[in-house]
Amino acid sequence: MEGRIKEIFVQKEALGYPFTYRILERLKDRKFHIIKEESPFFDDPRYKPKKDSLYLLVHKGSFLKPCPGTKQYICCRYQILNIGINCPLDCSYCILQAYFNQPYLRIFVNIEDGLKEVLNYIDERKDEIFRIGTGEFTDSLALDPITEWSKILIPHFSKRKNVILELKTKTGSIEGAISLPYRERIIISWSLNSPLISTKEEHGAISVEKRIKLAGICQKEGFVVGFHFDPLIFYPNWKEDYLRTIDLMERYLDPSKIIWISLGSFRYMPELKNIIIRRHKKSVVLNGEFIKGMDGKMRYFKPIRIELYSYMYDKLSSWYKDLGIYLCMESDDVWKESFGWSPKNSQGLKDFLDKRVIKFFGR
Amino acid sequence: MIFLSDIDVDSINTEFTPFSFSYGFDLSNLTESIKKVGLINPPILRMQKNEFIIVIGYKRILALKKLKLEKTKGFILSEDESPLECLLMSFYDNLSVRKLNEVEKAIFLSKLSSYIKSEEIVERYLPLIDLPKRKNIYEMYIWIESLSEKAKKLIASEAVSIKTIRLMYEKEIPLEEIDIYIDLMGKLSFSFNEQIQLVEYTNDICRKENIKLKGLLKKEEIKEIIKNPSLGKKDKAKRLMDILKKMNFPNLYLAEKTFKKMVDSCNLPDGVEIRVPFYFESGYRMEISFKNGKELRGKLKRLVENKELGKIKDPWKGE
C-alpha cells in the first residue's frame, strides 16, 4: 500500500511531533512539502481520489468520538478512535467518496498526545465498557506498514480491563499486530462480502478467501477475531455467493473464537449515488430497490433487508450457534423479523455486545 | 469615447453578437412600443470592420429590423474599448434592469470565460447572477451553453427546471439522451418534481437493465402511453411515472397496492384513515376524525368489531 504514495504534505505544525519524522523516515524516497494551512479544500464535488497524496496533520478535535448513529435505528454505541481519514483502497460503495473536498489520505500525527487523553477518559470510567475501533474513517491496518498504528495503540489497550480495541481491515497488513506480544482485548476484524462483490467493488482489497485465511492465522496466533458483512448487496445469485464466503469461514476458522459478526445492508447518503455512478461505471451496488430511510440515508426496501439478514443469520447460525451476530443500524421490527429477537434499543444492543466482550476477555 | 450618431439599421450586425446574451425573449411588447413612441434608448454600438457590432440593445435592433425601420440613433463606442469592457458594459446594463434567465447566465459565463480565468469568474461574477461561488456550478453553466437549442428554449422558459438540468449534468447524461428527455418533457406535462423523478427512475432502470434511454422508451407499455390520443399531457405524465415506479420499485409498488387493498376491504367508517409510513419504514397509523365523544365511541366500537382490521399486516408477509 505504501508504494502508492507519491507525495507527502506536512502541515508546519506537524513538524513538532516525532510521529511525523518516523513516517518521513519510512517514506524517505518520496517528495515532501511543508504546508501552512491545515489541509486544502478542493472545490470540486466531482470526487477525484488523491490516494497518492499523504497529508500529515495535527488533529484539533477529540480523538474519540461516538459512532454517528441515528435515533431512528438501533446503534451499537461503538466509539471511534479517529487516527486518520480516508484509505488507500477504493471501494465503490465507500461513504468517504462523498467527502469530496479532502480526497487525500490524512494521518493525525499528534496521535500519541490524543491517545493519552483518550486513555485518561477510559480510566476515569472503570465501570463502563468501551468498544473502540479505528476502522470507520479509514482502514485500520492498510497504512500500518507506514504508520505502525498497531504498535502505538495495541500495548495501551491490551492492558486495560474496561476496553477492547477492534482493528478492522480489508487488507493483509497484520504483521505489525502479530509481531507484538499482546493479545488481550485486541480484536482483529475483517469486512467480508461475497467473492463477486469483493472482486468487482472493493478495489485494492485482498480477496475474501485471503482475508478469511489471515483471520484463521490470527486465531492461531491467539487473537480473537470479528467480521463485518457490511455492506450486504442484493443482486442476482447473492444467496449462492454469500454462501461461498460462509463456506470459506467454515473451512478456515474456529467459530468459538469469533467475538461477533455484524450484518449491515448497503446504505448511502443520497449525494453518494451520482458519485458512484460516475466513478464506478460497472458497479452493481446501486442496482437495488432503495428507499429513503428514517435517517435520511438510502437503504433497501424493508422486506429485501429482512430477506438478506434472515438468510445470513440462518446460514451463519447453522454453522455455529454463538457467533454474536448483530445488525448495524436497523429497527426493532427488522431485528425481530430477521433474527427472531431484538435488543429493543441501542442500550440493549450495547449490553449484548458488552456481554460478548466479558465472555471473551473477562472483566 | 462615445458619441451619438445616425446609423443605417442594415449596417448593424445581428448575427455576430459577442457582447449580447439575451435568450428566450419575446419582441412583441418592444415592437409595439417602438411603433407608438419610437426608440427611446438608443443602442450602444462598436465599429468593427465597416459594420456595427451591438454592445447594448440587441433586442431593440431586432425590433427595428422587424419593423423594417431604416435609420436609428445610436451611441458609437471608440474601438479602444476592449471586448471585455464591452461585454461587462452589456452585463451591468442588463443586470440593472432585470434578472437573467438560466440560459442567459450560461451564455454570459461562456463569453466571459474567453477573457477571464475561471477562478475569478467564480469569485466575482457568480454571486452577481445569484449563483453560489462554486466551480462546479460555473462548469455546469458552461455545459448548459453546449445543449441543443430545443433544450435551451425549455430551460429559458422554465418549462424544465434548473434542478432537473443539474441532475442530468451530475449524472453525466450524454447530450443525445438529454435531447430525448427534453423532447419527452415537451410532449408530456411533468411537474418539476416529476421531471427529477423521471430522470432518476429512467436512469436507474437503464443502468439496472443495461439498456439505453431510447430502448426503454420503446417498450410497448411506455410507447402506448405516449402515443395514446385519448390522454392529456398531464395524464400521460402521471401514467408514465406510475409505470416507471413499478419497473424501478417492483416490491414497493406491489406492497403499496396490496396494503391499499387490505385497507379498502376493511370498509372503514367515514373519517377513519389508516396511514402508511414512508416506504413502510415505521409503524402504521390510524387517524380518526370525530365531532364529539359519542361519535368517537361509535367509531371505535365499529372498529373493534371489524374483523377485517385484524387481517392488516405488512403486505409482504404471507398467510
Image (cartoon, rainbow, N blue to C red):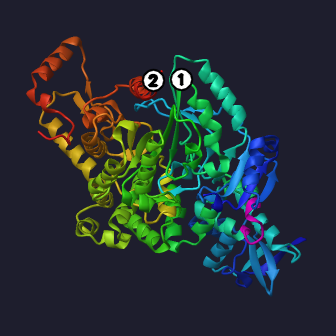
Quadrant in the rendering for residue B140: bottom right
Residue pushed farthest bottom?
B50
User: Do residues under tags 2 and 1 come within 8 Å of each other at their CB atoms?
Assistant: yes
Mark 2–mark 1 distance (CA, rounded to whole Å): 8 Å
Asked if badge 2 and badge 1 are on a common chain, one would say yes
Asked if the stretch drawn in magenta spans residue B118, the answer is: yes
Please tell me which residue is depicted at 32% across the width and 51% down the height of the picture. Answer: A251
Between A121 and B137, which is closer to the camera in this rendering?
A121
> Dot 1 surroundings within 10 Å: few (below 14), some, or many (20 or more)?
many
The percent coordinates of residue A32 (x first, y second) are: 78, 57
- Circle 1 marks a residue in which chain? A
Q: Which residue is mark 1?
A: A161
- Circle 2 marks a residue in which chain? A
Residue pushed farthest right?
B1
Between B8 and B103, which is closer to the camera in this rendering?
B103
- Residue A156 appears in view: yes
The boundaries of the magenta stretch are B112-120
The percent coordinates of residue B303 (x first, y second) are: 14, 23
In the image, B239: left or right of A43? Answer: left
Please tell me which residue is depicted at 31% across the width and 58% down the height of the picture. Answer: B244
Q: Secondary structure at mark 2?
A: loop
Residue type at mark 2 is Gly
Asked if the stretch drawn in magenta spans residue A287, the answer is: no
Of label 2 and label 1, which has the lower sequence position?
Answer: 1
* Numbered marks: total: 2
Q: Which residue is mark 2?
A: A362
Vertical placement of residue A21 versus B177, above or below: above
The percent coordinates of residue A206 (x first, y second) are: 48, 57
The percent coordinates of residue A247 (x first, y second) are: 30, 52
Please tell me which residue is depicted at 53% across the width and 27% down the height of the picture. Answer: A163
In the image, A161: left or right of B60? Answer: left
Q: Secondary structure at mark 1?
A: loop
